[in-house]
Amino acid sequence: MPSETQWRHDVLRLANTYGWTHYLTHYSPYSTPGWPDLALVKPPFLLLTELKTARGRLRPEQVTAGKLLNDCDRVAYRLWRPDDLDDVVHELSNGQGRLL
Protein backbone atom coordinates (compact mmCIF):
# COMPACT_ATOMS: atom_id res chain seq x y z
CA MET A 1 0.00 0.00 0.00
CA PRO A 2 1.66 3.26 -1.12
CA SER A 3 1.97 6.26 1.15
CA GLU A 4 0.15 9.45 0.19
CA THR A 5 3.48 10.89 -0.97
CA GLN A 6 4.13 7.90 -3.23
CA TRP A 7 0.57 7.98 -4.54
CA ARG A 8 0.99 11.69 -5.35
CA HIS A 9 4.22 10.92 -7.25
CA ASP A 10 2.42 8.16 -9.18
CA VAL A 11 -0.46 10.48 -10.14
CA LEU A 12 1.93 13.27 -11.15
CA ARG A 13 3.97 10.86 -13.29
CA LEU A 14 0.79 9.76 -15.07
CA ALA A 15 -0.39 13.35 -15.48
CA ASN A 16 2.94 14.33 -17.04
CA THR A 17 2.84 11.30 -19.32
CA TYR A 18 -0.55 12.36 -20.67
CA GLY A 19 0.30 16.04 -21.07
CA TRP A 20 -1.39 17.58 -18.04
CA THR A 21 0.06 20.63 -16.28
CA HIS A 22 -0.23 20.63 -12.52
CA TYR A 23 -0.20 22.82 -9.46
CA LEU A 24 0.49 21.32 -6.06
CA THR A 25 0.39 23.19 -2.78
CA HIS A 26 2.74 21.49 -0.34
CA TYR A 27 1.87 23.90 2.44
CA SER A 28 0.07 27.20 2.35
CA PRO A 29 -1.23 28.96 5.42
CA TYR A 30 -3.27 31.18 3.08
CA SER A 31 -5.27 28.40 1.39
CA THR A 32 -8.81 27.67 2.45
CA PRO A 33 -8.74 24.62 4.75
CA GLY A 34 -9.80 21.50 2.89
CA TRP A 35 -8.83 22.75 -0.57
CA PRO A 36 -7.78 19.81 -2.82
CA ASP A 37 -4.16 18.71 -3.04
CA LEU A 38 -3.65 18.91 -6.74
CA ALA A 39 -4.91 20.95 -9.69
CA LEU A 40 -4.50 19.30 -13.10
CA VAL A 41 -5.04 21.27 -16.31
CA LYS A 42 -5.23 20.09 -19.90
CA PRO A 43 -7.41 22.55 -21.81
CA PRO A 44 -10.30 22.52 -21.93
CA PHE A 45 -10.28 20.42 -18.74
CA LEU A 46 -9.57 21.28 -15.13
CA LEU A 47 -9.45 18.58 -12.46
CA LEU A 48 -9.09 19.35 -8.77
CA THR A 49 -8.06 16.22 -6.94
CA GLU A 50 -7.78 15.14 -3.34
CA LEU A 51 -5.31 12.30 -2.96
CA LYS A 52 -5.64 9.85 -0.09
CA THR A 53 -4.25 6.46 0.81
CA ALA A 54 -6.62 3.51 0.94
CA ARG A 55 -7.19 4.21 4.63
CA GLY A 56 -6.81 7.99 4.53
CA ARG A 57 -9.75 9.89 5.93
CA LEU A 58 -11.13 13.15 4.69
CA ARG A 59 -11.20 15.95 7.24
CA PRO A 60 -14.56 17.73 7.57
CA GLU A 61 -13.11 20.73 5.69
CA GLN A 62 -12.15 18.43 2.79
CA VAL A 63 -15.66 16.98 2.63
CA THR A 64 -17.10 20.50 2.54
CA ALA A 65 -14.68 21.63 -0.20
CA GLY A 66 -15.44 18.52 -2.26
CA LYS A 67 -19.19 19.14 -2.07
CA LEU A 68 -18.71 22.78 -3.03
CA LEU A 69 -16.55 21.85 -6.03
CA ASN A 70 -18.91 19.09 -7.16
CA ASP A 71 -21.62 21.75 -7.44
CA CYS A 72 -19.56 23.66 -10.03
CA ASP A 73 -20.44 23.16 -13.69
CA ARG A 74 -17.01 23.93 -15.11
CA VAL A 75 -14.72 22.08 -12.72
CA ALA A 76 -14.27 18.38 -12.05
CA TYR A 77 -13.43 17.36 -8.49
CA ARG A 78 -12.09 13.89 -7.76
CA LEU A 79 -11.09 11.95 -4.67
CA TRP A 80 -8.48 9.46 -5.83
CA ARG A 81 -7.06 6.55 -3.85
CA PRO A 82 -4.54 3.95 -5.03
CA ASP A 83 -7.39 1.50 -5.70
CA ASP A 84 -8.68 4.02 -8.27
CA LEU A 85 -5.58 3.66 -10.45
CA ASP A 86 -7.48 2.30 -13.47
CA ASP A 87 -9.95 5.19 -13.28
CA VAL A 88 -7.11 7.70 -12.92
CA VAL A 89 -5.34 6.31 -15.99
CA HIS A 90 -8.58 6.33 -17.98
CA GLU A 91 -9.43 9.88 -16.96
CA LEU A 92 -5.97 11.30 -17.59
CA SER A 93 -5.40 9.45 -20.85
CA ASN A 94 -8.77 10.49 -22.29
CA GLY A 95 -8.79 14.08 -21.04
CA GLN A 96 -11.93 13.65 -18.97
CA GLY A 97 -13.51 16.34 -16.88
CA ARG A 98 -16.13 18.97 -17.39
CA LEU A 99 -15.62 21.44 -20.19
CA LEU A 100 -14.49 24.88 -19.10
Image: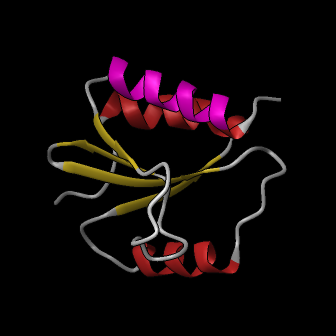
How many badges with numbers are in the image? 0
Residue 35 in the image, given as x and y percentages of width and height: 47, 68
Between 9 and 95, the one nearer to me in the picture? 9
Residue 22 in the image, given as x and y percentages of width and height: 31, 39
Judged left or right of residue 15, residue 11 is right
Judged left or right of residue 13, residue 85 is right
Residue 71, by quadrant, is bottom left
Residue 54 in the image, given as x and y percentages of width and height: 80, 45
Q: In this view, does 99 lie above or below 68?
A: above
The residue sitting at 35% across, 17% down in the picture is 17
The residue sitting at 25% across, 25% down in the picture is 19
Q: Quadrant of the C terminus?
A: bottom left
The residue sitting at 45% across, 29% down in the picture is 12
Judged left or right of residue 12, residue 8 is right
Q: Principal SS element in the magenta part?
A: helix
Residue 34, by quadrant, is bottom right
In the orientation shown, which residue stands out farthest toward the top?
Answer: 17
Asked if the magenta segment contains residue 1, the reply would be no
Asked if the magenta segment contains residue 6, the reply would be yes
Q: In this view, does 28 lie above or below 87?
A: below
Q: In this view, does 54 lie above or below 21?
A: below
Q: In which quarter of the image is the N terminus?
A: top right
Task: Tell me which segment is drawn in magenta.
Answer: 5-17
User: What color scheme is it?
Assistant: secondary structure
